[in-house]
Amino acid sequence: MRTALLPLALSSVVAASVAAEDPPPRAVLPAACDVPSATVVPDDSFSDRDLRRLNPLAEFHIDRGRLAFRNLGDERKLAAIEGYDVEWWACDDGSGERLLVAESARFSTPSIAIPRRPYPVLVARLRTASAAEPRWRKAIEVVLRRAGDGFDIASVGRED
């Protein structure tokens, strides 16, 4: 599986470590859960052709304990959707391996409740269900890092 990635800003601690060429601190996401940096492509720059070949979800953000997003393909009326399938994974800080914490479930709205368990790092694997656009089943992984009582989005990876 080849993945094109859309990164978000690194924390100041990580950025400082990289600048100093030291190994990153323990608080950095384990390799199995991190999504490496790549060129950022603005979501609004996707053409209709682009949106027909990849999962059209974009502009991920946290809103009152929920992972929310836009579906650019649905907004442009490129195809009807049946819903969004999501699996939730937690990362083990010691081994860097993922643990499935919520089996795949289907949602009808572009806003999904984040599990309330005390995991430091969660990964949401999202797929868009559309009979008319089977390529929308390509996965998008959103890595969330705990920040106080909630989460921040650490990175977004898109299956190509």
Image (cartoon, rainbow, N blue to C red):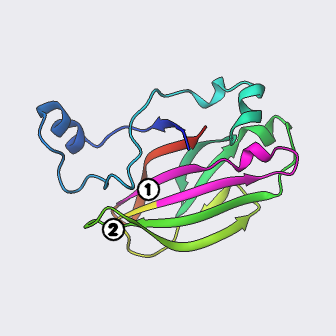
Q: Residues within 10 Å of mark 1 (few under 14, many from 20)?
A: many
Q: Secondary structure at mark 2?
A: loop
* CB contact under 8 Å: marks 2 and 1: no
Q: Residue at x 37, y 37 (%)?
A: 9
Q: Would you say 47 lies left or right of 101 here?
A: right
**Whole-percent x, y for residue 115 in the image:** 51, 71
Q: Examine the rendered structure and indicate whether residue 125 appears above or below residue 20.
A: below
* Magenta span: 123-146
The foreground one among 9 and 29 is 29
Q: Give the mark nearer the N terminus: 2 vs 1.
A: 2
Q: Would you say 7 lies left or right of 104 here?
A: left
Q: Residue at x 38, y 70 (%)?
A: 119
Q: Residue at x 65, y 58 (%)?
A: 111
**Whole-percent x, y for residue 66 in the image:** 56, 61
Which residue is identified by label 2? 92
Which amino acid does the dot numbered 2 rest on? Asp
**Whole-percent x, y for residue 159 in the image:** 59, 42
Magenta includes 90?
no
**Whole-percent x, y for residue 107 in the image:** 72, 64
Q: Residues within 10 Å of mark 2 (few under 14, many from 20)?
A: some
Which residue is identified by label 1? 144
Q: Quadrant of residue 136?
A: top right
Q: Which circle, 2 or 1, is nearer the viewer?
A: 2
Q: Could you give the CA–CA distance between mark 2 and mark 1, rounded to whole angstroms?
A: 14 Å
Which amino acid does the dot numbered 1 rest on? Leu
Q: Residue at x 42, y 38 (%)?
A: 8
| Quadrant position of the C terminus in the picture | top right
Q: Secondary structure at mark 1?
A: strand
Q: Would you say 45 lies left or right of 64 here?
A: right
Tell me if I can see residue 113 in this picture: no
The foreground one among 96 and 114 is 96
